[in-house]
Image (tube, rainbow, N blue to C red):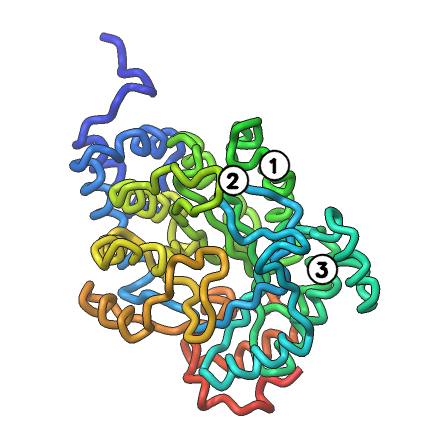
């Protein structure tokens, strides 16, 4: 009798057994993940995977969900890329186009510190100096050869005000990351997808040269070589297939296994925005988001946190957030009492007290963290020594954030 094809649909019993093995072994194999990924639309399969992912999360990472109290600093929203789902990117002269001065960075950092924030999230457009002559001239007049060089100084300013920067500036060279490393607690770049198809005409990334998967993977590798605590992630719903999602998750796992620098993976569902080419594309349904968060938990294993942005999960009420808390998610990312989510301005941050109540209702505990996780903070080789000292000054004995009001200015000064 012929054995079943590797592509044949798995039975529910087989899926339950694979998920149980993943919980016990701390990882799931690619072929099994691909076959399960194609079946996540089946409610019974979804339930089995989510249940296993929740058990894995509790076993591997405890009944703790983390969050970072931050301020969002979009140093410039000028960007040379034109992703078909994005409203953040601007050109000079567009309404809302803005580049922050160092004085504004200082003022915002100071206000954030007073509000109890620890993380300064620098998120900005990709290499605008390559596209806009007026911006190049402005940078030169300030004495900076590139946005990356200006960003280094902005991070220094934030550090001098007692903040811990986390930078996501799009594609950076290894030399640029090395210059930023002493002034950042962690850095990041959403891998988004490994799908080359989406670079083709009509795809979400056709007009975005910096979204080339090979280039983004190269930056992840170079961050690993530099030993930088790193955040990555996957977008859900921009045109990728289930198999491409699995490929993306396994690319992240390979990076984490090889370098040990990947601290978290964000699972970010697409939400359509007015005035974009993808405005009519539907957002992924709740089951889709829950299923892929759960599968990510089982694929990525104990060493990588799985983040579910709470402002995107609560756009349609609290139900999705509650489900994600029972499907393997163990982090909410940054939540700001001061600033909006400039990437997703339609999605307001939930209040930290509300997140705490929802987490406790799910039988877990919310803990505030630094821009770097306790597991990475314990590894001195991942930091410039002075930056690690700044992080330790703001951490409790377990490596989580201690209350900001108990941290004196001298403890974190540049």
Which residue appears at 40% of the width and 30% of the height? 241
Image spot of residue 56 (x, y percent): 28, 52
Is residue 171 visible in the rendered image? The answer is yes
x%, y% of residue 391? 54, 76
Question: Residue 309: which disc?
Answer: none
Quadrant that contains the C terminus? bottom right
Label 1 CA crowd tier, 10 Å (few <14, some 14–19, many 20+): some
Q: Which residue is mark 2?
A: 84
Q: Name the quadrant containing residue 11.
A: top left
Q: Is residue 91 left or right of residue 24?
A: right
Q: Is residue 168 visible?
A: no
Q: Earlier in the sequence, mark 3 or mark 1?
A: 3
Q: Nearer the viewer, mark 3 or mark 1?
A: 1
Residue 47 relative to residue 337: left or right: left
* Residue at (43% x, 77% y) in the render: 401
Of helix, strand and loop, which one carries label 1? loop
The mark nearer the N terminus, 2 or 3, is 2
Where residue 148 is drawn, which disc sits there?
3
- Mark earlier in primary sequence (2, 1): 2
Q: Quadrant of residue 155?
A: bottom right
Estimate the x, y position of residue 290 in percent, counting from the top left.
28, 46
Kindly identify the residue that appears in the image at 50 percent across and 67 percent down. 372
Q: Which residue is mark 1?
A: 207
């Amino acid at each position: 009798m012929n054995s079943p094809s590797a592509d044949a649909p798995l039975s529910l019993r087989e899926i339950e057994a694979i998920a149980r093995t993943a919980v016990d072994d701390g990882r799931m194999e690619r072929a099994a993940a691909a076959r399960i990924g194609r079946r996540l639309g089946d409610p019974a399969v979804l339930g089995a995977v989510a249940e296993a992912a929740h058990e894995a999360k509790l076993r591997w990472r405890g009944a703790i969900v983390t969050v970072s109290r931050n301020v969002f600093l979009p140093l410039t929203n000028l960007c040379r890329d034109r992703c078909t789902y994005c409203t953040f990117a601007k050109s000079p002269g567009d309404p809302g186009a803005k580049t922050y001065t160092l004085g504004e960075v200082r003022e915002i950092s100071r206000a954030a510190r007073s509000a109890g924030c620890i993380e300064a999230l620098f998120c900005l457009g990709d290499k605008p100096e390559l596209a806009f002559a007026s911006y190049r001239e402005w940078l030169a007049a300030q004495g900076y050869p590139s946005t990356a060089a200006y960003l280094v100084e902005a991070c220094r300013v934030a550090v001098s005000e007692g903040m811990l920067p986390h930078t996501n500036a799009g594609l950076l060279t290894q030399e640029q990351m090395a210059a930023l490393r002493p002034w950042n607690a962690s850095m990041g770049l959403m891998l988004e997808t490994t799908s080359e198809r989406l670079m083709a005409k009509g795809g979400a990334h056709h007009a975005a040269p910096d979204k080339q998967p090979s280039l983004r993977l190269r930056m992840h590798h170079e961050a690993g070589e530099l030993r930088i605590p790193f955040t990555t992630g996957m977008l859900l719903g921009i045109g990728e297939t289930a198999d491409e999602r699995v490929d993306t998750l396994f690319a992240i796992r390979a990076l984490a296994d090889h370098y040990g620098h990947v601290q978290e993976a964000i699972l970010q569902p697409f939400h359509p925005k007015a005035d974009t080419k993808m405005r009519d594309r539907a957002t992924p349904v709740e089951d889709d988001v829950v299923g892929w968060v759960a599968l990510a938990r089982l694929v990525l294993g104990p060493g990588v946190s799985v983040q579910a942005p709470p402002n995107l999960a609560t756009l349609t009420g609290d139900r999705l957030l509650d489900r994600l808390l029972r499907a393997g998610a163990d982090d909410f990312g940054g939540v700001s009492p001061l600033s909006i989510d400039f990437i997703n301005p339609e999605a307001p941050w939930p209040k930290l007290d509300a997140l705490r109540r929802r987490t406790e209702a799910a039988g877990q505990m919310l803990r505030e963290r630094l821009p770097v996780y306790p597991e990475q903070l314990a590894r001195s080789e991942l930091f410039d020594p002075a930056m690690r000292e700044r992080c330790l000054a703001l951490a409790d004995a377990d490596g989580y954030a201690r209350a900001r009001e108990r941290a004196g200015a001298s403890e974190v000064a540049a």
